Image (tube, rainbow, N blue to C red):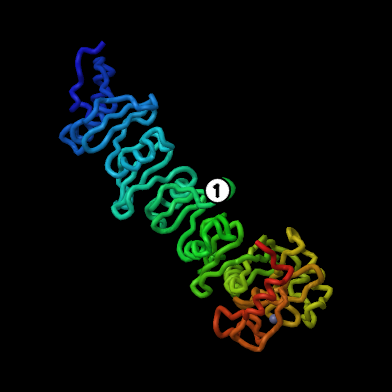
């Protein structure tokens, strides 16, 4: 039984408040009253109360409205204030009975110092002066959080979570992009030129359907790619936007590691050119092979359709390799000496590339594997004068070369 009412001013010292309750048997103040006085009471920014402390319609928590905001209390979340446009958004969604539930924070300044947010049990509402207040929740909110919230390239939300026109998925648009979610694909961001192109094709209603990846860096280079259910969109400063509906799967077998250009540099270069043909280059596996007797491999005349016994031995190394997959064997050298050689045993599509090969050799040899012949033009990938002599990187593919590559049985639909 308590004898004294605590002067609300004392709750500003939480330790003292606790001590009065524990040691002197004072009646604890309602957590809403404590929060109110911590925020300045009637002379603070909340102003005077406009209701008493009332039980919420869900019967779980309590609230009190004030001239300039409200304080909501939930037994496991404590008491937190909501006000302004964030409160208006929460109200528009149905207060604590919405998916957002009760507030878990007061309105808080974002780390970028521009906006404000409240976290709730079931999501968050983010506000900034130029965007207004919008909710993010669920898997989309988790993706937003994992990218760095408003400090990411996405910046602030521009919509609530919204059902897509096809009725299957959900999305939030943000200042710097979008996050799309479906039950089967999860939540992925799409932004920039790739998003703009996807939008121009009709978003998820296009043949690409939903994103199945975030935007990814392509083999450590300048290229970027987003994967969708129906294909991929590639962008690079030199290739621009390219929709990739086909793919080749490449396995790397290393007898001697490349020395002039890294594997990533060679794959990035190959993808840059293959993107012109609408073909995605997937590096499916990388394996080191200890085969000293094949490290200076005899390739004979290196004519398509004819192979030496050393090539036959080398191309027998097919761990992980599916029937339509391609293999590149990195060797110290070929005998006679070339940058690479694309002749391969029947049914074992692949090529040999030497350690000192050019940036474009990998793409050039796989161009042969997909059916291309040499041309006498150093502007083009298929120059027969050596890919070190390419004059306008990235080298050109003609539209007929592109369609030959797409029509090869070795490039398959994504
Ligand atoms: Zn060639």
Q: Quadrant of the N terminus?
A: top left
User: Of residues 225 and 128, which is closer to you in this image?
Assistant: 128
User: Of residues 355 and 380, which is closer to you in this image?
Assistant: 380
Q: Is residue 271 left or right of residue 16?
A: right
- 123 above or below 62? below
Q: Secondary structure at mark 1?
A: loop
Direction right: furthest residue: 309
Q: Is mark 1 within 8 Å of ligand 1?
A: no
Direction left: furthest residue: 43
Q: Is residue 138 visible?
A: yes
Residue 104 at x, y percent in the picture: 37, 36
Q: Is residue 132 left or right of residue 356?
A: left
Q: Is residue 261 visible?
A: no
Say which quarter of the image contains residue 154. bottom left
Residue 156 at x, y percent in the picture: 37, 53
Direction top: furthest residue: 1
Q: Quadrant of ligand 1?
A: bottom right
User: Of residues 277 and 392, which is closer to you in this image?
Assistant: 277
Q: State how many labels appear.
A: 1
Say which quarter of the image contains residue 288. bottom right
| Circle 1 residues within 10 Å: few <14, some 14–19, many ≥20 | few
* Identity of the residue drawn at 24% across and 15% down: 24
Residue 217 at x, y percent in the picture: 52, 63
- Name the residue that disc number 1 marks: 168
Q: Quadrant of the C terminus?
A: bottom right
* Identity of the residue drawn at 52% across and 62% down: 198
- 203 above or below 338? above
Residue 403 at x, y percent in the picture: 67, 75
């Amino acid at each position: 039984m308590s004898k004294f009412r605590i002067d609300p001013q004392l709750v500003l010292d939480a330790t003292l408040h606790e001590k009065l309750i524990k040691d002197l048997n004072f009646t604890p103040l309602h957590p809403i009253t404590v929060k109110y006085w911590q925020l300045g009471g009637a002379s603070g920014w909340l102003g005077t109360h406009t209701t008493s402390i009332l039980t919420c319609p869900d019967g779980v928590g309590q609230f009190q409205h004030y001239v300039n905001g409200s304080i909501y209390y939930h037994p496991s979340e404590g008491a937190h204030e909501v006000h302004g446009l964030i409160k208006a958004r929460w109200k528009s969604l149905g207060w604590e009975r919405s998916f957002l539930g009760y507030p878990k924070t007061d309105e808080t300044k974002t780390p970028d110092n521009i906006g404000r947010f409240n976290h709730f049990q079931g999501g968050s509402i983010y506000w900034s002066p130029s965007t207004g207040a919008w909710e993010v929740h669920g898997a989309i909110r988790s993706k937003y959080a994992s990218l760095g919230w408003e400090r990411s390239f996405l910046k602030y939300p521009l919509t609530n979570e919204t059902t897509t026109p096809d009725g299957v998925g959900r999305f939030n648009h943000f200042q710097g992009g979008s996050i799309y979610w479906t039950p089967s694909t999860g939540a992925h961001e799409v932004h920039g030129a790739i998003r703009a192109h996807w939008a121009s094709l009709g978003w998820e209603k296009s043949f690409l359907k939903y994103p199945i990846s975030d935007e990814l860096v392509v083999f450590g280079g300048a290229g970027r790619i987003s994967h969708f259910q129906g294909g991929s969109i590639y962008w690079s400063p030199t290739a621009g936007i390219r929709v990739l509906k086909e793919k080749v799967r490449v396995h790397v077998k290393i007898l001697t590691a490349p020395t002039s250009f890294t594997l990533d540099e060679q794959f990035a270069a190959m993808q840059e050119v293959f993107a012109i043909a609408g073909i995605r280059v997937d590096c499916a596996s990388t394996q080191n092979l200890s085969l000293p007797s094949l490290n200076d491999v005899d390739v004979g005349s290196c004519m398509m359709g004819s192979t030496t016994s050393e090539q036959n031995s080398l191309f027998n190394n097919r761990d992980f390799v599916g029937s339509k997959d391609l293999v590149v064997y990195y060797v110290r050298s070929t005998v006679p000496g070339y940058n690479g050689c694309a002749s391969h045993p029947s049914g074992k599509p692949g090529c040999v590339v030497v350690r000192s090969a050019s940036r474009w050799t990998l793409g050039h040899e796989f161009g042969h594997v997909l059916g291309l012949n040499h041309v006498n033009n150093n502007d083009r990938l298929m120059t027969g004068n050596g890919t070190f002599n390419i004059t306008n990187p990235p080298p050109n593919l003609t539209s007929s070369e592109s369609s030959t590559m797409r029509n090869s049985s070795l490039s398959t639909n994504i």
